[in-house]
Amino acid sequence: NPNGTLVHEAAALPPGRALDVGTGEGADALWLAEHGWKVTATDISGNALARVRAEAQRRGLTVSLLRGDAGDPAPFGTETFDLVSLQYGSFKRTPDQRGLRSLLAAVAPGGTLLVVHHDLSPLSDPVDVATQTRMYDPSAFVGVDEIAAALTAEPDTWQVDIHETRPRPAGAASTHHVSDVVLRATRRTA
């Protein structure tokens, strides 16, 4: 099933070119294609992209596929998109912020950036390291708040429309997180 926040936010936008970053099984990319968007889906996993390709063919949809990581050189090609969506994805923090710069550069003037991630603030609570094993280190990855800070640092380029914590949408299964951080921004036109 597509992510509920994507469905809610994208339904209000006119269809155009969309980039689904970290597409995984491709539910968001397929939903967008079914609703008139020209979609490019990216993922680091070739297996995930093969599944997206098979499901798109089964449904008679066209979805362009790119394999790579946001930290790769030109990970999303040279085109820009009317909607760039990063749903629960992550990319590593690097000194040159290549992944973040690539994500922002992919948004066309007048386009929308939509980033949704689990609210990780409960992970900042003190833990007894003798009883806990942290499998995921959030500080190693670029977070939603960091993306929002990069946008607000460029007010002539970006308008942050939404940056808030929300309860997970109804129907969001298989998760222990109850809240999401949602960021929606518009790249200003010249």
Image: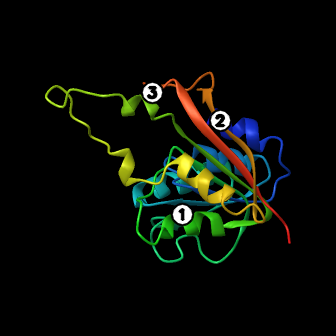
Q: Quadrant of residue 187?
A: bottom right
On the image, the x and y values in percent for residue 17 come to: 75, 62
Q: Is residue 135 left or right of residue 76?
A: left
Q: CA distance from mark 3 to mark 1?
A: 26 Å
Q: Residue at x 63, y 50 (%)?
A: 29
**Circle 2 sits on which residue?**
164
Contact, mark 3 vs mark 1 (Cβ under 8 Å): no
* In front: label 3 or label 1: 1
**Residue nearest the viewer, comparing 109 with 145:** 145
Q: Amino acid at mark 2?
A: Glu
* Mark 2 vs 1, N-terminal side: 1
Q: Residue at x 32, y 43 (%)?
A: 136
Q: Amino acid at mark 3?
A: Thr
> Dot 3 surroundings within 10 Å: few (below 14), some, or many (20 or more)?
few
Q: Relative to the observer, which residue lies in front, 44 or 83?
A: 83
Is residue 67 or residue 143 the one in the foreground? 143
Q: Dot 2: few (<14), some (14–19), or many (≥20) neighbours within 10 Å?
A: some
- Secondary element at image label 1: helix
Residue at mark 1: 100
Name the residue type under label 1.
Leu
Most distant residue in the left direction: 130
Q: Quadrant of the N terminus?
A: top right
Would you identify the image quadrant in which residue 41 lies? Answer: bottom right
In which quadrant will I find the C terminus?
A: bottom right
Which of the two labelled residues, at mark 3 and mark 1, occupies the earlier sequence position? 1
Provide the residue designation for mark 3: 175
